[in-house]
Image (cartoon, helix red, strand yellow):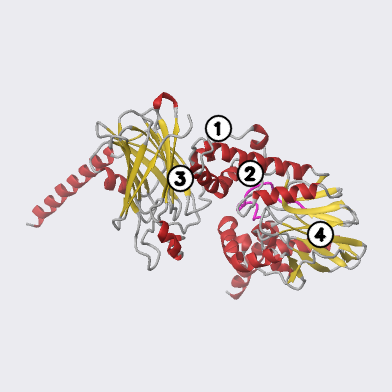
Amino acid sequence: MRALSLIAGVVFAALLVQSAVVAAAAVPDDPLASSQWRYMARKYFRDAPVVFDERVQVIAPDYAEDSLNTPVQVSAPELEGVEQVLVFADMSPITKVLDYYPIKARPSIGFSFKVQQATPIRAAMRTADGTWHVGGTWVDAQGGGCTAPSVASANPIWETRLGETEARVWPRANGESRLKFRVVHPMDTGLAAGIPEFFITEVAIRDADGETLARVEPYEPVSENPVITLDLDVRGPLTLAGRDNNGNRFEASVAPSGS
Amino acid sequence: MRHGLALVLGLLASAGAMGQADYYDLAPRQVAANTYVLLGAQENFSFENHGAISNTGFIVTDDGVVVIDTGPSRLYGEAMRAAIADVTDQPVVQVYITHAHPDHFLGSNAFEDVPIAALPQTTEAIREIGTDLASNLYNLVGSAMRGTTAVVPTAKADTEHRVAFGAHELELIAARGHTAGDLMVFDHSTGVLFAGDIAFHGRAPTTPNADIAAWHETLAATQQRDFKTLVPGHGPVVEGGEALAQTADYLTWLVQGFEQAAARGASAAEVMFMPLPDRWAALAVEPGEYRRSVSHLYPAIERAALEGDDTP
């Protein structure tokens, strides 16, 4: 009986080892050498294929001068067929930073986020075949980004401007355009004492016919009063329609300026 | 056993003393009669430079020694006092703090027996955020900061009258632009102007608390003064106004570049990674300081471009 259970134990252990080997083979080693990489990969990609891809460019300062507003620009001019862009920060108390669906747009997005401690900031781009293409860089920080209260939380006058949106479109070559917009919103993380999470959950960019060109889904780590830059495949009058986790809705229209 | 312990303690003590002596190797350089400068490293804060990245100075007079800025830490301040004592037997009688940045005032622990004067804005800033600045610097430079606390200046710098120390007649100039309060010390008897961080020389200016328009006004007004030698807050001492002109040129380029980038829709991260022209790429601490300035200055400029249509 004892021998049987020992054998069963050995077989079980062997199976465990084998499955660990299979899992390890599926997730490539992290060029950024983050202790959280395998956990991040399991959480966000599950069984989908993952590759580190130099075509996925993430630029951010190596040190967060302002831990509440650390700029990052994600782009992949050489990568075709990107359906989703997931931005995450391994060491952040809230790791998911933003999802972006570039429907008639380039897989390119610029914004600022809150940095709590030194962390990789990564962009994972899912192409039509289901593969995640990952790029990233380290940002060092003194801390205090995610657990600091928003400026707005101490200044009730801002409530009257909640959802106020400024937007501008710059025509680019080949009929494309760049859109930049700013929404007045505290983007509270829920990690500052006594201030519940309160953040924009979606901004959809639509053309004059109401067709969605791109959709941004920010999470708590995106900076207060976010400024977001996108590159659209088309140009023309646009509407922006957003909402937050409290059900507030906001809308804005913008036409290309100059030419 | 007791001998062994004493030996160990002795080794620890000597190791501690050696470590301390190694932190700051301060060699006063004479730049005019009775006037000395301790040059900081042309670098950002690091564990290697122990925070000694800005220039401090002192003037030896028959009424005692006047100190301009105290450096980044208590240990620096103590090393500075020792360096002064190597030059003169005169006691330190007055300290002036040019502005409330940590590399310039956190050595004041070593001068707490002396009147420490500053502009009101500087005193206020040190009182408000001095402790945060000190703990921030601990993180950046490490154990050289031990024992350092933010010493609030004890007196208001007299910017109304010239102040005489022995044969040295000092004019204390209240300015602003680099910060809300930038004190400059102009020694009319030697023609030496201690400009603080109004002037950077060969090193990229820093902008965390800058008002660029006010800074330009200060630079232009200072250029009109009849000083002979200028001691910048960072970088080599220089005859004439070259450091003022270089600082003004850099700030002009910086803001114009940000405005142009904002007008074409560039994101902040894209602006951070724009290549610098050779003239400015050659400055010490670039492109790091340029990237910090994007964080300080670009958000407001970017917002203005979103609100107003500035398309040519």
What range is drawn magenta here? B38-51
Around disc 1, counting alpha carbons within 10 Å, would you say few (fewer than 14), some (14 to 19), or many (20 or more)?
A: few
The answer to whether residue A257 is left or right of residue B186 is left
Residue A221 highlighted magenta (yes or no): no
> How much space separates mark 4 and mark 3, taking CA atoms?
42 Å
Say which amino acid is labelled 2: Val
Say which amino acid is labelled 4: Phe
The chain identifier of the residue carrying mark 1 reads B
State the residue lying farthest toward the bottom.
B2
> How much space separates mark 2 and mark 3, taking CA atoms?
20 Å
Earlier sequence position, callout 2 versus callout 4: 4
Which secondary structure, mark 3? strand
Q: Say which residue label 4 marks.
A: B58
* Chief secondary structure of the magenta portion: loop
Say which amino acid is labelled 3: Trp
Position in image of residue B298 (x %, y %): 55, 45
Say which amino acid is labelled 1: Pro
The chain identifier of the residue carrying mark 2 reads B
The verdict on a common chain for dots 2 and 4 is yes
The answer to whether residue B186 is left or right of residue B280 is right
Q: As displayed, is residue A11 above or below residue B279?
A: below
Q: Say which residue label 1 marks.
A: B312
Numbered-mark total: 4
Residue B148 shows up from this direction: no
Q: Say which residue label 2 marks.
A: B285
> How much space separates mark 2 and mark 4, taking CA atoms?
26 Å
Q: As displayed, is residue B56 above or below residue B298?
A: below
The verdict on a common chain for dots 4 and 3 is no
The chain identifier of the residue carrying mark 4 reads B
